[in-house]
Amino acid sequence: MITAAVDQDRTTKTKLPALSEVTVSIRSETRLIATVRRTAGGVSVSGDGGPSLTCAKMTGGAATCRTGDGAVVAEMKVDDPSASDRVLRLLAAGGALRWKIHVQPDKLVLSDKEDGGDAWTITRKPASRARVIDAKGKSVGGLKPGPSRSTVTVETVDNHKYFTVEGAPGSIIGALLLIPPLAQADRLLLMAALFAHGI
């Protein structure tokens, strides 16, 4: 079981519902994949595989991620957390880049290289929609409105329903499920960070 938490940056304007607590469930057709919870105290993510991890808020737009015994395993850094155009970096404990996300008003660009090479793109669309483009420029799927107002489906390009995200139709964190190069621990940590910043 992986557990990750990032305290919400209170200076960031969120696009998610202004509720004291929001719970998002991500399911495949057969099981629960991850749960994301935003409370007044922060954001937590739990899911399958790997050790338990916790990321606590630090100053300057950074959070340190630790295992249950306190060992540092990763760090999150955000350039200017209040800006609409910002960069989020997931770093290994030694400081090496694991993933970089360039957050822009209309898209997210994800790369495991500092220069942004081999990047995946998540393009935001109106009405809880998004499109995921792989590093070769090919569309692999995206997000579409689900059967209820609080549900978004994650679908492959051939319209195969891959996952269901319930509880926050304004968030595009479910699109990370369509990016196979992301390790499960990194995916959950990035979900927590994006959710904490209202993305």
Image (cartoon, rainbow, N blue to C red):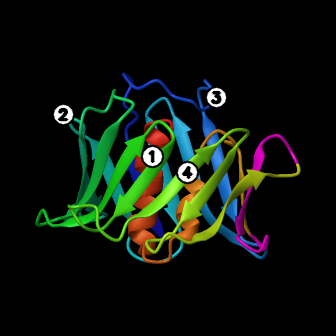
Outermost residue, right direction? Answer: 147
- The stretch in magenta equals 148-161
The disc, 1 or 4, on the residue closer to the chain's N-terminal end is: 4
Marks 2,3: beta carbons within 8 A: no
Q: Where in the figure is residue 30, as x and y percent of width and height?
A: 77, 76
Q: Which residue is mark 4?
A: 123
Q: Which residue is mark 1?
A: 194
Q: Quadrant of residue 29?
A: bottom right
Give me the C-alpha separation between circle 1 and circle 2: 16 Å
Q: For numbered disc 2, what is the local secondary structure?
A: loop
Q: Which residue is mark 3?
A: 17
The amino acid at mark 3 is: Pro
Give me the C-alpha separation between circle 4 and circle 2: 28 Å
Q: Which residue is mark 2?
A: 60
Which residue sits at x=23%, y=39%? 79
Q: Where in the figure is residue 38, as x and y percent of width and height?
A: 53, 39
Residue 3 seen by the camera: no
Is 63 left, or right, of 172 in this rendering? left
Marks 1,2: beta carbons within 8 A: no
The disc, 2 or 3, on the residue closer to the chain's N-terminal end is: 3
The amino acid at mark 4 is: Thr
Give me the C-alpha separation between circle 4 and circle 3: 21 Å
